[in-house]
Image (tube, rainbow, N blue to C red):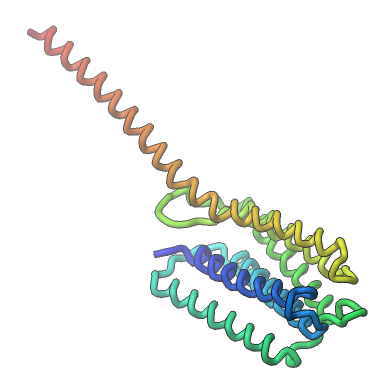
Amino acid sequence: VRKKSSVILAVAFLCTAILGFFHTLTFQGMPGFETAGDMHKSMSFWLISRSIIATTLLGLAFDPEDSEISQMQSYGVLSAGLLATLGWGILVFAFPNLIPLTFIQGAGQTSFKVACETSLIAAHILAAVLFYRHALRFQIDKSAEHLHIDRVPLFLATVLMAMSEVYFSIYAETSDVNVVIGHTFLLFSAIAIYRSMVAVNIHTPYASLAASTNNLAKSAEELKLERQRLSRMIDTAI
């Protein structure tokens, strides 16, 4: 049994990583992908991957009650995510003309691309507000039985993602410094998400084990003192 949010986040970031890899392969200047049409493919992969993350985080923010799902359901979520990623890949690689143009060589981003980035900014801001409210209202479960997610780093991550999308919506050339700044914000947001999910779940079992060890040591010491006290009482009675 696993927590639903942990499974959905893991699958979403796996799919995003695959689409991000395709985005990198088709970026302008990569061997074999140097035409303006392929730059449109790269931007399409980018928008799809960022939309997956924004939708996932927003859905998680709207559903603070983290229910449990079985291992079979987890595999179902994974399969659905991979199939959707395969479908998006086929669409962008084989039928790029079905997607509104995102980048024009010499002119830069299209209005459609900027509008999509603006929508992503709004989604991240809304998610950040909701995660901030969650952080104030809920205390995360420190039990080591299940993976859990700390909402405070997720709030920081969504804010950083919103800031990164601002820079991705204003660059004119692919070599623009705003692209570098945007990716830097994304790097810090990834670290925040790591802290919210991975680091806290690695630390929790060891912290629980250390606390149990301390409690056992304290109980053993108390038992030793009780045995000594009982021995003295027996000696006094004799």
Q: Up-down: is 77 above or below 193?
A: below
- Position in image of residue 85 (x %, y %): 59, 80
Q: Can residue 75 be seen at all in this image of the molecule?
A: yes
Q: Give above or below for 229 relative to 181.
A: above
Determine the image quadrant of residue 158: bottom right
Which residue reaches farthest right? 107
Q: Is residue 238 above or below residue 15?
A: above
The answer to which image quadrant residue 68 occupies is bottom left
Q: Give the left or right position of residue 119, taking residue 230 as reference.
A: right
Q: Residue drawn at (74%, 76%), measured in percent from left and top? A: 31
Residue 129 seen in the current view: no
Outermost residue toward the front in this view: 31
What is the x, y in percent for residue 47? Answer: 73, 76
Q: Residue at x 65, y 58 (%)?
A: 190
Q: Position of residue 140 (x, y in %)?
A: 53, 51
Quadrant of the rendering where the C terminus is positioned:
top left
Q: Quick one: 6 or 21, which is closer to the camera?
A: 21
| Frontmost residue, 226 versus 111 | 111
**In the image shown, does 133 or 27 lie closer to the viewer?**
27
**Within the image, what quadrant is residue 133 found in?**
bottom right
Residue 104 coordinates in the image, percent (x, y) = 87, 82
Q: What residue do we see at 87% from left, 68% from top?
A: 171
Q: Which image quarter is the N terminus in?
A: bottom left
Label total for image: 0
Q: Nearer the viewer, residue 227 or 133?
A: 227
